[in-house]
Amino acid sequence: MTERNYNVIETENGAPIKAWTKGVPVEAEAEAQLKNVARLPFIHKWVAAMPDVHWGIGATIGSVIPTKGAIIPAAVGVDLGCGVAAVKTTLNARDLPDNLHNVRTAIERAVPHGRTANGREADRGAWANPPAENLETWASLDERYKAIVTAHPKIAHKQRVNHLGTLGTGNHFIEVCLDETEGVWLMLHSGSRGVGNRIGTYFIELAREEMRRFFINLPDRDLAYLAEGTEHFRDYVEAVSWAQDYAMQNRSLMMNAAIEAVRASGEVPEFNATVEVVNCHHNYIAREHHYGENVIITRKGAVRARKGDMGIIPGSMGARSYIVRGLGNPESFDSCSHGAGRAMSRREAKRRFTLEDHERATEGVECRKDADVIDETPKAYKDIEAVMAAQADLVEVVHTLRQVVCVKG
């Protein structure tokens, strides 16, 4: 009998949890959250926990939640459609300059990142005057957005156009990486920005109101759900679908801008950037068929990994990242991890690590080395090698990448 590659966590009065966490620590708070989700009456079969699983709001980040007849907005979160895109170029490491500072600053000038002015009009993380390509992309999204806002006016966001093609803050990044053959890649991580956050936040509160209205008590108010067949359910599915499309276009626009920035920097020879392209969500919902039934899959910090699916599992600022191919493991609902996963909170990372620690951990990477990125320092994350070993039956590694440039918001 083949030994299974996952742990089973039994839940009293609930569905089991299959956790691909062998050799990876799991915090007690995350396990408690998994059990709370597993106790919901509309879980299909079991909850799957990926090796990067860690505490989140409502549901753990790094979990796959199959449901029948309901969706939990807080389990999807507020960075709707968040994901990673990667492009392999025809450049080789020998084509890069010894000092990569100018390459980094060229990308930083080309893509708005970070957040200032409390996110208002003067925010440096938004476009003051969006490029023509961005305006054309918004035009393809505008009609559906207007319909969503007409039904739910509170969703309206001033920066909807100005955030398209921008990075954001936190763990979002743009990187230049080298693969196992010294080939040069560009990789970036971002989602649906302020407009997606507004949609997610609005429907999370709407779900809580539904629970109060029908006197439904839950172990965690962030597990409030919307029942299929209701108007709010239909509107939420449409709004999330739109935000996921926005996020995909956001990554594509940023990637185009980053490629052109590197090309125009004068630091590298002419190159093409269409050798291999991957663009995948890791924070989203999808209707899928599993174990004989049509269900809704919520991947909160997880990547779809059907047999042959290409995916991206990034490490932290100073660790390896992986381009992977799905093995189509049905027990994980065809899923894998979305990264290394945090080992501690941002506050704890800032308390525990010094600038010197961060500088040592990111040696050889052209990146920010100031106090404002300490919460993103590599040791704030789990060991990506252990995470990959724990999911060897979910994906196979196609490329191994290491960062040489990292842009953070």
Image: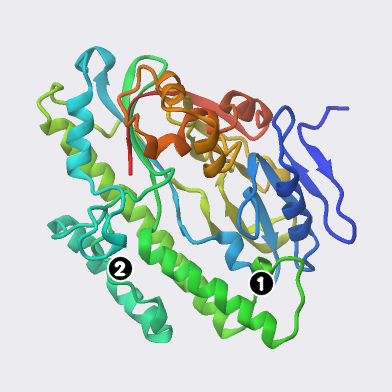
Of residues 328 and 93, the one drawn nearer to the viewer in this rendering: 93
Q: Secondary structure at mark 1?
A: loop
Tag shown at residue 40: none
> Badge 1: how crowded within 10 Å, few (<14), some, or many (20+)?
many
Q: Residue 358, how many percent across, how many down?
A: 43, 26
Q: Residue at x 28, y 66 (%)?
A: 159
> Badge 2: how crowded within 10 Å, few (<14), some, or many (20+)?
some
Query: Is 222 situated above or below 349?
Result: below
Residues under labels 1 and 2: Cα distance? Answer: 29 Å
Q: Residue 51, how many percent across, how many down?
A: 66, 37
Q: Residue 54, how many percent across, how many down?
A: 64, 44
Q: Residue at x 83, y 27 (%)?
A: 2
Query: Is 87 situated above or below 299?
Result: above
Identify which amino acid the numbered label 1 is placed on. Answer: Ala
Identify which amino acid the numbered label 2 is placed on. Answer: Leu
Q: Are marks 1 and 2 in contact (CB under 8 Å)?
A: no
Q: Secondary structure at mark 2?
A: helix
Which image quarter: residue 151? bottom left
Q: Is residue 299 left or right of residue 332?
A: left
Which image quarter: residue 179? top left
Q: Residue at x 71, y 33 (%)?
A: 25
Q: How does the figure colour the protein chain or chains?
A: rainbow
The residue singled out by tag 2 in the image is 141
> Which one is closest to the eye, mark 1 or mark 2?
1
Q: Is residue 47 left or right of residue 398?
A: right
Q: Is residue 233 visible?
A: no
Q: Residue at x 80, y 37 (%)?
A: 7
Query: Quarter of the image containing the N terminus?
Result: top right
The residue singled out by tag 1 in the image is 224
Q: Is residue 197 left or right of residue 263?
A: right
Of residues 179 and 39, the one drawn nearer to the viewer in this rendering: 39
